[in-house]
Amino acid sequence: MREVAIIGVGLTKFGELWDQNIRDMFAEAALKAMENAKVEKIDALYVGSMSSGLYAYQEHLASLMADYIGQIGVPAARIESACSSGGQAVRIGYMDVATGMHDIVLVGGVEKMWDVEDGTFVLATAADQEYEVYNGVTFPGLYAMIAKAYMEKYGLTREELAQVPIKNHKHAVNNPNAQYPFEIDLKTVLNSTMVADPLRLMDCSPITDGAACIILCPLERAKEFTDKYVKIRGVGAATGPIALHDHKDLTRLEVVHLAAQRAYQMAGVGAEDIDFVEVHDCFSIAEIVVAEELGFFEYGKGGKAIAEGQATYGGKVVINPSGGLKAKGHPVGATGVAQIIEAYYQLTYQAGKRQVENARLGMTQNMGGSGGSCVVHILEGM
Amino acid sequence: MIGIVGYGAYVPNYRIKSSTIANQWGNDPVSIEKGLLLVEKTVPGMDEDTITISVAAAKNALKRARIDPQKIGAVYIGSESHPYAVKPSGTVLIDALGIGPHVHVADFEFACKAGSEAMYVAYSHVKSGEMDYAMGIGADTSQGAPSDALEFSASAGGSAFIFGRENVVAEVLFTHSYTTDTADFWRRDHQSYPRHGGRFTGEPAYFKHILGCGRALLEKSGMKPEDFQYAVFHMPNGRFPLKAGKELGFKQEQMNEGLIVPIMGNTYSGSSITGLTAILDVAKPGDKIFMVSFGSGAGSDGFIFQVTEKISEVQDLAPKTRDMLNNPKKVYLDYGKYVVYRRKILFNEY
Amino acid sequence: MANSQRYTREIPRRYRLEAQKFPSGFVSLPRRYVDPISGSKEYENIKLKGTGTILTYTIIHVTSDQFKFITPYAVAIIETDEGARITAMITDTSFEDIKIGARVELVFRKIMEEGPSGIVNYGYKAKVIV
């Protein structure tokens, strides 16, 4: 196995991209990444997308994108694992380079979410269609049930829960690519529209158009292209039951623990070594449970720890310096790649005002469904 | 002995008061409550239709019959609000209850008498020796157009009856049917609400057929009104059945138990037969029950039942009709909610 | 939405609560081939009685088009008395009576309609026993 480096990144603006179709967005991010890495020819392409078929009526993405970035002929495949499609694509790209199969690999994620009317239905296809969705569950509804169980078991208050989006919006202020780069206060959260009790609109990540791409190459060749590169030090992935009701403990997302343990083991580090982490805060409660599963806080104490400032600059670990899914935006298939890009910026000291001081080890955690899949990466600055 | 071996009713959880409807349209609530004896009516939940009501009633009938559903040879559902124009209601029911696939199934429609019709055919199958058990059901989520007189009465609910030879709780002693072509009330295909002939629905329709059937049944049986503990008739409102019963020679005391219309409304195919379940809930061995249904179009089915000593074994095995009607958790709807529940807001779906 | 072919094959589970009990004690309403706990391929066919307890729930205010005319509505994760975990809508129950730990019975209800011309979808919902 070879060591693998990230040598270039490219992102579109996250938000409502009315003028761009799915290939426009992908091409923008991919060409930026190639330019950033000073790469003209790639050896392989992986595209993560959750539901381009339902969102944009377009499957067969990998070949389409290969064509529109001027790389026709290259071997390419699309990777799907619901909201963790992007992270999974990075993992596959990593494996492709690490095994020696290919040298220069472009990994991207893309989602065009604003072209459909019934986005709630599309997102719900990540849940068990016959036994959850049929019975009226929505995606926010699943996380609302986790929140309800968690609040009952651990006494987390509604106000404490609100601190997660408040913190993430604060971080996003310094992120020029973020969809919502502004602060919100407690009143905004508590007065926002009820979506699925106890979750309100301000607990939910938004609908976002966007694409994110990175270029991977063997670590030993990274210097040929750039002096700004990071090393992928740990990779861990896991599956869990896609139906929430099959999770033994409804206050946990065990899939995250499993994926994180694999990544920590491969990297030879622990939670205490991590300087910052980009987590999958698709809903406020998710960030709390995920932070616990990653080992940053004890079970049942994550909510209070985040509310007390343990997850921001100066705390125990900076969680979501980018603004997270909530404020940066959540183009589902692109999110896992965008998290890696934030880690790349932090570890190459290009994060501007949101730079985590002395950042050396960063982590990303990308999750599919209500804990059906998870990918964790540990990245190291060089 | 051939008769009912299990019976069950189902009443939805929602109600609207006559006064709520009267106030909506500027009618006098007192004339509805006191004149027509309509105080409140049942409204189906948003997830209920004739099929779900039939399933719930049939489950209660099975609880009382205590038989293997596989032994039921025929299932008939009578209704004028079958959810599909083409596709049977009964097939959903047999698959939900584990009856069949070796079973004869049909949906019936004959305005408000489709339920008694289903019972009549089910009973006849057992009587012929063709099968051991057969089930007849009447259920409706009745339609009444906004501001029409029917809006005060059109309600939801239903009852199911399993006929057999063993462990009979109410023996069928006599039956009679009386039918003519009388268009007093009808609904054409693709129409949301029925139309009716106003006062033409009274004397030439309701009374002519109920009395014609009732008199023939008394004559056929050689019985007199005073031989019966209970009598129940189709209940489009509270006034009509009491008037018809009295004309046949019955007293109000014989009709009170089955007269559920003031607090249920007219459940169309489920009307007189749900009254019958309320009677069976309290009947004693040896009691005789006189029942005549009415369906516009028009016809009446008459039954004479005699309750057996088995009745007391089954009365408590499923919810009783009046308990469901008087459920302390019933929910009263305002007119706006009622309009949503009955899907009276129309818009173009695509 | 479940078109008629997709709908019809699920009838034994949705109408009659036909389930499987595996040697580890795991009970599955969806058809399974392997016990997720023990890996055993042996199982016994059982029928759920239709009673259970609420493990968690939510009240949904914003939903997909197919359910938008019944909002707000409650959905719960229920453990049946046999140990099967299911997700079901709650019907005929005031929201104040819905609690973690509340007892429920399953009733046969209409789940949705496929627009004005498609099939009607039936299945189980839960009703809190007060």
Image (cartoon, coloured by chain):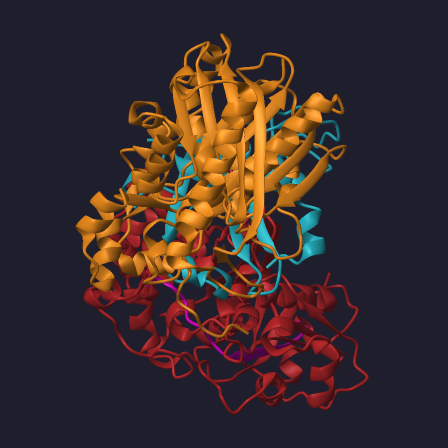
Depicted A52 relative to depicted B318: above or below: below
Magenta stretch holds residue A190: no
Q: Position of residue B119 (x, y in %)?
A: 59, 32
Depicted B118 relative to depicted A302: above or below: above
Depicted B55 relative to depicted B187: above or below: above
Magenta stretch holds residue A204: yes
Hue of chain C?
Answer: cyan
Looking at the image, how many numbered discs can be counted on the residues? 0
Which of the pair A292/A193 is nearer the observer?
Answer: A193
| Quadrant of the rendering where the N terminus of chain A is positioned | bottom right
Which of the pair B242/B236 is nearer the observer?
Answer: B242
Say which residue appears at 45% left-offset and 52% top-offset. Answer: A142
Furthest residue toward right = A73
Position of B347 compared to A44: left or right?
left
Which of the pair A272/A34 is nearer the observer?
Answer: A34
Q: Position of residue A316 (x, y in %)?
A: 33, 56
Depicted B138 relative to depicted A255: above or below: above
Position of B264 compared to C68: left or right?
left
Q: Position of residue A350 (x, y in %)?
A: 44, 81
Chain letter for orange, please: B
Hue of chain A?
Answer: red
